[in-house]
Amino acid sequence: MIFGFVSTRFAGTDGVSLESSKWADVLLEMGHECRWFSGMSDRPTPVSYVVPEAHFEHPSIIESHRSLWGRNQLDKADAEKIELLRSHLREELSTFIANHHIETLVPQNALTIPMNIPLGLALHDIIRETGIKTLAHHHDFYWERERFSGDAVKHWLDEAFPPDLPSITHVVINSAAKEDLFTRRGIASTVIPNVMKFSSSCPPEDAYNDDLREAIGLSEGDRLILQPTRVVPRKGIELSIDLIARLNDPRNKLVISHDSGDEGHEYFDHLTALAEEKQVDLRMVADRIRTERSRNSKGEKCYTLRDLYPVADFVTFPSLYEGFGNALLEAIEFGKPTLVNRYSVFKDDIEPLGLDLVIIDGTITDKTVSQVKSCLENGFDGAKNRRLASEHFGYDVLRAKIEGLILDL
């Protein structure tokens, strides 16, 4: 079969881009073919169909969305802009399906969170009109984000985010989302968790990243405490700063891998001030972390997120909310001792497995500090975590789930 993946963006290290690649890996191993429709793509050109207006950062999408949220009424002019874009994207999707002989659509969050309302509406139209078989992969719903509020666009959200159409099979990434989707919309779904290709041993350092610690200004004897997330409020980075402050050891450096993304820089400024107040050495290294190993305009080496994990001494993941938590799986893959906050998906779908983690419940306690000190001073064996994670979140799990979905189709 030929599967057509559709999203606003297939590029970089965001969850949608990463998980869609894993789905494609499994489908290709099973003998199927994959094509990609998006507003930005790092997939091979022959199998990609790029339409700029499909990206949530396209100027026309930003302009049309600017006046939609937090309002109870929709201006006629704003509605007309959305409908024009909807029509344009519907035509582009039709061309994509015809030219690439798509047999099954795989919308990746495009029918879930309204980063690009016209794209979701266009997808809805195509699926309803043609009855094309569709596996809609939902990562995070609009009702999980406060910024997507107001009644002005409720009719569009009810129509397409997600749509309840007979040819669509819905997939969610955690059990809470499955329950929520059925309670809110009466739509049944299948849970397929995010996965990782776990090996029997930790991926090591190599000749490229063995100078990474020095490149970001760490000295011999320093400890790299890695926060492998974007700088956004739901990542709970204040808790990591509090942890470092309470450890009270100048060797500990808190290193944050990503920048603020599309959610503004106020939180970044808040964290910088908080770290200074608590005398925590905070290193923002997003300017040296890219999707591929390369060099910047100054000729300096740039590294990937996967280069950071092997040289880290400890990983902090104190998120307040996550759709799943890829960073946690990555830390387990690399065998790193990890602190994790009990966000709801962790409590329901991950914690019951019995992984060896430093677990907090919204607060850094004396026990937390003691556990982290023990990990830093006595070492950590991640073999048990890799084994358990592989059993529940490995590629074999994804393959079995996808095989079942295809049989249903």
Image (cartoon, helix red, strand yellow):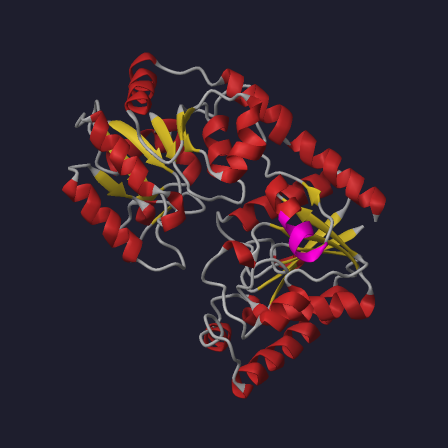
Left or right of 69? Residue 208 is left
Task: Kindly tell me whether residue 206 is visible in this rendering.
Answer: no
Task: Kindly tell me whether residue 18 is visible in this rendering.
Answer: yes
Position of residue 158 measured from the top left corner of the image (x, y, whole percent): 65, 66
Position of residue 237 measured from the top left corner of the image (x, y, whole percent): 33, 42
Tell me which residue sits at (31%, 37%) in the image.
239
Can you name the residue that lies furthest to the bottom here?
Answer: 77
- Please tell me whether residue 255 is drawn above or below residue 264 in the rendered image: above
Q: Residue 28 appears in which quarter of the rendering?
A: top right
Left or right of 144? Residue 295 is left
Tell me which residue sits at (29%, 19%) in the image.
370
Left or right of 186? Residue 230 is left
Position of residue 388 measured from the top left corner of the image (x, y, whole percent): 58, 21
Q: Residue 353 appears in which quarter of the rendering?
A: top right
Tell me which residue sits at (57%, 55%) in the image.
141
Position of residue 215 measured from the top left corner of the image (x, y, whole percent): 26, 37
Return the residue nearer the eye: 221 or 126. 126
Can you name the residue that lies furthest to the top here?
Answer: 378
- Please tell me whether residue 270 is drawn above or below residue 198 in the rendered image: below
The magenta segment is 180-186
Is 205 part of what is drawn in magenta?
A: no
- Please tell me whether residue 276 is drawn above or below residue 387 in the rendered image: below
- Please tell me whether residue 285 is drawn above or below residue 346 in the rendered image: below
Main SS of residues in magenta? helix
Can you name the residue that lies furthest to the front here?
Answer: 183
Q: Residue 243 appears in which quarter of the rendering?
A: top left
